[in-house]
Amino acid sequence: MNLRIKTVDNLSFEGKKALVRVDFNVPLDKDFNVTDDTRIQAAIPTIEKILNDGGSAILMSHLGRPKGTFDDNYSLRHIVLTLEKALGRPVKFAQDCIGTEAELIAEELKPGEVLLLENLRFHKEEEKGDRDFAKKLSRLGEIYVNDAFGTAHRAHASTSVIAEFFFDKVSGYLMTSELKNADKVLEKPERPYTAIMGGAKIADKILIIERLLDKVDNLIIGGGMSYTFAKALGGTIGNSLLEEDKLDFVLDLMEKAKAKGVNLILPEDTVISKAFANDAEQGLADKGQIPDGWMGLDIGPKTREVFAATILKSKTILWNGPMGVFEMESFDKGTKAIAEAVVAATKAGAYSLIGGGDSAAAVNKFGYGDDVSFVSTGGGALLEYMEGKILPGVAALEP
């Protein structure tokens, strides 16, 4: 973490209005109920610090992809009750994030009060990083706080451009915690260090996989991306996911891993299915032996044992991406087995970082969120940070 960046602990918010960028991009059901309030709960400590100091908090966030125009399906008014419950106090709501009404409510806000602004992305200027839009937002507060790690890799008006209008700009507790925990697996990790990479596509993770080869002792490959490895090694993969243009990259990666002394571990067997459906006909295939008309949708029992054995010997664990289609009960056993191994290793003293996105969803689905060291709220932002990229939302906080 950049030590020059100030955090909320470096300031007193007494009598001040804090404009806080949070990440309330939460899932809603058809009746607009919040189905997972993890991101809301993650922002509470920062908001409470501001209020306990005697300040007031003006919260801004995006929700979904409304494409720069008002769409009630993406209105943040739907989350007000959930936020009030999490904070244990009433929350005022402004029907726009800029303009006269928002400015008036913000101006009249008293110490200890909270205001939630309407969806930033109802204005196309937000995603464009428009300076004039950022300036209008900045009028609402006296101190800028960025606690939205999940959007820190975006150079949007509210995440990076806005900071130039503030003398006092700090990171919230969540942002600070995310950066510190990412640094634990990047700088001097305790060994053995194991990275578990899953998910559908290698293309999404090329840079981080290459960077990890210089850092890890073990690299476990599972999920949809593993079938491209199987194909590159001359195996048959049926109708499984394949990135044809990554076959040479995979072979090159395996050579690099060997040269660097990294133990690259691939699946030994695969749970296969006739269709991408929970109730479809299932079977089991050894590595590289998936018949035509079948597809791999989870790691098999032998693989679970091999992967778990390596994880249990590890002292540092990074996990990004599920082992199969964990959303379907028929194909969630591999991901669950890995989660259980990571939890057991953590209990034995290992440090474990779950890398946001589907991995975080899986760990939470199985109820293990509190049994690992840290669950990141930012999938894309974490990957980019670990790839060595500068995150605009973090760079903007530098003095």
Image: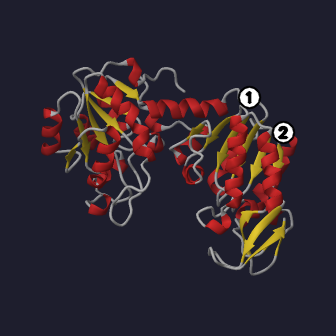
Which quadrant holds residue 30? bottom left
Q: Residue at x 41, y 32 (%)?
A: 396
Q: Residue at x 28, y 49 (%)?
A: 80
Give the Cα separation between the discs numbered 2 and 1. 18 Å
**Kind of residue indicated by mark 2:** Lys
Nearer to us in this view, 331 or 218: 331
Q: Is residue 130 above or below residue 169?
A: below
Q: Position of residue 177 (x, y in %)?
A: 51, 31
Q: Position of residue 98 (x, y in %)?
A: 21, 44
Disc 1 element: loop
For the N terminus, the quadrant is top right
On residue 1, the disc is none
- On screen, residue 149 versus residue 216, left or right, reads left
Q: Residue at x 29, y 28 (%)?
A: 51
For the C terminus, the quadrant is top left
Mark 2 touches mark 1? (CB < 8 Å):
no
Q: Position of residue 118 (x, y in %)?
A: 26, 49
Q: Nearer the viewer, mark 2 or mark 1?
A: 1
Q: According to the image, label 2 marks what residue? A: 260
Instruction: Of the two numbered discs 2 and 1 on the same chain, state the one appearing first in sequence.
Output: 1
Disc 2 element: loop
Q: According to the image, label 1 marks what residue? A: 190
Nearer to us in this view, 183 or 52: 52
Q: Residue at x 58, y 63 (%)?
A: 327
Q: How many marks?
A: 2
Residue 387 is at least partly visible in this image: no
**Kind of residue indicated by mark 1:** Glu
Q: Position of residue 129 (x, y in %)?
A: 35, 45
| Mark 2: few/some/many CA within 10 Å (<14, 14-19, 20+) | some
